Image: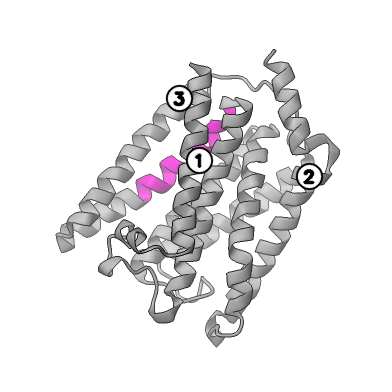
Amino acid sequence: MSRFIRMALVLASLGGVFLGVAFYFQWSWVKDFWPWSGGYMGRGNLTDLSYYFVSSILIAIAMPNFWVGLTGEFAALVGGAMNLGISASGIGLYMLQSYQSTDNERLLTGGIICLVEVGLAIAIFLWARRIPFADQRSLPRPLRVIFGVFAVLLVLVGGALILKWPNVFPWPLRDEVSVVYGWIFLGAAFYFMYGILVPKWHNAAGQMMGFLAYDVVLILPFLDHFDSVRDEHRASLIVYTAVVILSGLLAAFYLFIYPPTRLWRSHRVAAIAAG
């Protein structure tokens, strides 16, 4: 059963990466995933940036599940389940509320899919929280502080996006895009909070991998956007780009350089603990 679950996680993660690649290159069929305004997620020539952002989120979500599939550290699924449950519940309810005022059937379908994901997240949470970590290493203390900072920032930015505040993002967002992004950020905030409350390294390893993937996808589009960014969005672009660069360096350090947490050591320790 354990082997089947691990294989399912790896396959699901590869599917998420494939979907992320499709959004990055804006293959024609991915527009059907967006239920508002003919499938477009941005305004004018800034549509591309929203596709890049969604691509980064999809690949970042896939990486922690891929890592759990490789290592068998099922306890690390709890934080991800919280993330999915909170994000999907907010987005799903927003879609269903929007459906009542527009009769757009794609919103109804999207809302139902999100609520199904909430049920899946609850099931995973209840199952995985009873499983102990095979690798008992603690989360490095500096990462606990950094996770706390990220959690606060994600709550603030997510809340501002849900309230549709202008100029929060480095490019103008449609109202529905702003709300969806806001719930994605709030879900991620709880993922970081859980890492602080249960400070085990494997509650951070997958997130660090997701961070790195998120940064790799976004860094070039963000740097390229400096040539065309509007004045009112320039400060936001500077802050987001700085966060992308710093978080990427942080993830690379803990995943590949810092001896106690290097990925190959994590995999070896978990394998030994599993017998």
Residue placed under numbered mark 1 in the picture: 13
Mark nearer the N terminus (2 vs 1): 1
Q: In the displayed image of the protein, which residue is found farthest to the top?
A: 275
Q: Amino acid at mark 3?
A: Leu
Residue beneath the point at 64% across and 32% down: 198
Residue 204 placed where, x, y %? 66, 40
Residue placed under numbered mark 2 in the picture: 256
Residue 80 placed where, x, y %? 52, 38
Would residue 205 be seen by someone viewing this image from the given angle?
yes
Residue beneath the point at 36% across and 59% down: 30
Mark nearer the N terminus (2 vs 3): 3
Helix or strand or loop: what does disc 3 sit on? helix
Q: Amino acid at mark 2?
A: Phe
Residue placed under numbered mark 3 in the picture: 126
Is 84 a magenta residue? yes
Q: Which residues are magenta?
A: 75-90
Distance between the Cα atoms at labels 2 and 3?
Answer: 32 Å
